[in-house]
């Protein structure tokens, strides 16, 4: 079948062309996804008279959205990684059962997250940094997003599965379509219909519904070896456990991001007020655009690394890792150059308020100090996840967010400056850069240990194409086979 040939090429085609084939659509999709969020902020920031407060309210919703996205990422990434491994093992029946379980798990989690978050929406937004001025805008936006929460859960999970089954271009098209639809609907609902920030939320949900319908249609094609049909949606304990185990890393990453944004918001409110939170929302939007490109590269790497690891083609696994690191480093160097030397141009897209512009540029220049090495850190964490080693990936994500960043957020803002005053908002920004630097060193040590440290005899034999001890192969097979 055509799909069998598409998956087989993962183990035979040249790595450089293969990575480009899978990474470029994923990069376009992830960039589009980032632009999709940026579009909301650009339009919201220009709402007459309340643009700055609306941006502050939108920034407060980040932790709630990260928390909801954490559950979706756990199923989507865990399921698509397991599918790649199964396809590499030519276990097509199990791969199809994984696809059905992705749907069922996302429906269950999407409903549960929506119900719980809606019940506690007021204390959640208040706890996450909403002030008396920004709370109404945060509530209006978040309430509608949570009502439609099941849609992005399903869409993101199935889009990852679509990519793993050999349809990177279709996955890209689905994400790009959300941007186009959202960009068309945003000004209509926000300005023409006068719905303000509530209109932005409605446009967001409608664009996600459109993308979900497209992805569902593509995955229902009976001509494909792996497709949606009756009989695959029943949850199977072993599949569910494996999906959640592999997906635990992105879940922890998102959960930690939620905690970190809470601390960032509280620190910024305490030292700089609502305008500091609005500045963080803009700076985060700009820098996150480059992070999304790197995550797109990681998504392109994931099916290649997972397939070749499952097929025991370890030289190809190493090669795709090296090339992904190189591409990610180039992207993050671009982020450093833009945000350090030409920051005013991207900031102007979001606001014309001179005070907000000044705060944003100042903070963004500090955040990107470590940008050139961040790409290596992100790729390394995703690499371990892609080959079914979630514990290493979880450690990297948790250490960056909790072990390093949280203490820095508590300490740096209170450090005295030369004038004897607390470092304040600049200390909050500096915490992010410092955590990135130390997390990169940690990732380098773990990657070196994987190739040369403990268990190096087993690893070197794998890299040289020698036989793996049967007990190691059996252990891994038992961990990932339903």
Image (tube, rainbow, N blue to C red):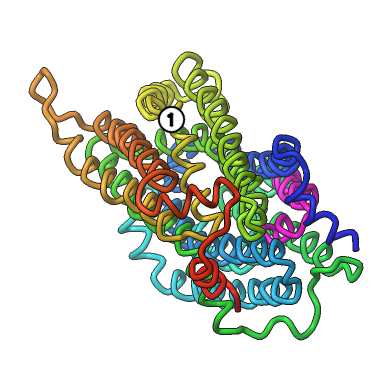
Look at the image and tell me in which quarter the C terminus lies: bottom right
Specify whether 130 is left or right of 307: left
**Where on the picture, by quarter, is residue 24?**
top right
Instruction: Indicate the position of residue 361 as horizontal and vertical percent values.
Output: 41, 23
Instruction: Read off the magenta span.
Output: 158-182
Instruction: Indicate the position of residue 281 as horizontal and vertical percent values.
Output: 44, 39
State whether residue 452 is above or below residue 90.
Answer: above
Question: Callout 1 environment at 10 Å: few (<14), some (14 to 19), or many (20+)?
Answer: many
For label 1, the residue is: 373
State whether residue 236 is above or below residue 259.
Answer: below
Specify whether 368 is left or right of 171: left
Residue occupying the point 58% across, 60% down: 77
Instruction: Indicate the position of residue 166 as horizontal and vertical percent values.
Output: 78, 55
Magenta-drawn stretch contains 276: no
Q: Looking at the image, which is closer to me, 135 or 193?
A: 135
Instruction: Indicate the position of residue 116 as horizontal and vertical percent values.
Output: 44, 74
Residue occupying the point 51% across, 15% down: 342
Residue 192 visible, this angle? no
């Amino acid at each position: 079948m055509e799909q069998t040939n598409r998956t087989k090429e993962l183990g035979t085609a040249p790595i450089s062309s293969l990575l480009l084939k899978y990474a470029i659509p994923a990069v376009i999709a992830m960039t589009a996804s980032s632009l999709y969020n940026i579009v909301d902020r650009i339009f919201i920031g220009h709402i007459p008279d309340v643009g700055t407060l609306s941006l502050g309210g939108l920034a407060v919703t980040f932790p709630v959205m990260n928390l909801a996205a954490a559950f979706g990422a756990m199923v989507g990434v865990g399921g698509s990684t397991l599918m790649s491994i199964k396809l590499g093992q030519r276990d097509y029946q199990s791969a199809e059962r994984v696809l059905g379980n992705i749907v069922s798990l996302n429906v269950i989690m999407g409903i549960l997250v929506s119900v719980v978050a809606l019940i506690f929406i007021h204390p959640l937004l208040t706890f996450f940094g909403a002030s008396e001025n920004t709370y109404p805008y945060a509530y209006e936006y978040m309430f509608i997003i949570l009502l439609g929460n099941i849609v992005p859960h399903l869409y993101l999970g199935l889009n990852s599965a679509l990519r793993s089954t050999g349809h990177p271009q279709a996955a890209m098209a689905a994400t790009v379509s959300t941007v186009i639809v959202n960009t068309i609907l945003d000004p209509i609902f926000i300005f023409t219909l006068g719905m303000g920030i509530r209109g932005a939320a409605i446009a967001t949900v409608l664009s996600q519904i459109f993308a979900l319908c497209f992805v569902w249609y593509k995955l229902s094609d009976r001509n494909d070896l792996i497709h949606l049909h009756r009989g695959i949606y029943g949850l199977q304990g072993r599949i569910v456990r494996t999906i959640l185990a592999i997906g635990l890393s992105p879940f922890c990453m998102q959960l930690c991001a939620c905690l970190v944004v809470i601390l960032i918001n509280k620190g910024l409110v305490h030292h700089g007020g609502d305008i500091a939170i609005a500045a963080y929302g803009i700076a985060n939007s700009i820098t996150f655009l480059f992070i999304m490109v790197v995550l797109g590269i990681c998504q392109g790497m994931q099916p290649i690394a997972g397939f070749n690891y499952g097929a025991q083609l370890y030289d190809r696994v190493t090669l795709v890792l090296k090339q992904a690191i190189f591409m990610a480093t180039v992207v993050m160097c671009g982020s450093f150059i833009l945000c350090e030397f030409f920051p005013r141009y991207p900031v102007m897209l979001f606001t014309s308020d001179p005070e907000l512009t000044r705060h944003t540029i100042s903070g963004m220049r500090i955040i990107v100090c470590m940008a050139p090495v961040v790409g290596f850190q992100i790729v390394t964490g995703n690499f371990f996840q892609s080959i079914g080693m979630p514990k290493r990936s979880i450690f990297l994500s948790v250490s960056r967010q909790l072990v390093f960043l949280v203490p820095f957020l508590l300490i740096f803002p209170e450090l005295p400056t030369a004038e004897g005053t607390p470092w304040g908002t600049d200390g909050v920004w500096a915490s992010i850069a410092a955590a990135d630097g130390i997390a990169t060193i940690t990732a380098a040590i773990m990657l070196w240990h994987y190739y040369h440290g403990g268990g190096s005899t087993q690893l070197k034999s794998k890299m040289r194409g020698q036989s793996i001890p049967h007990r190691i192969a059996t252990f891994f097979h038992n961990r990932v086979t339903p």
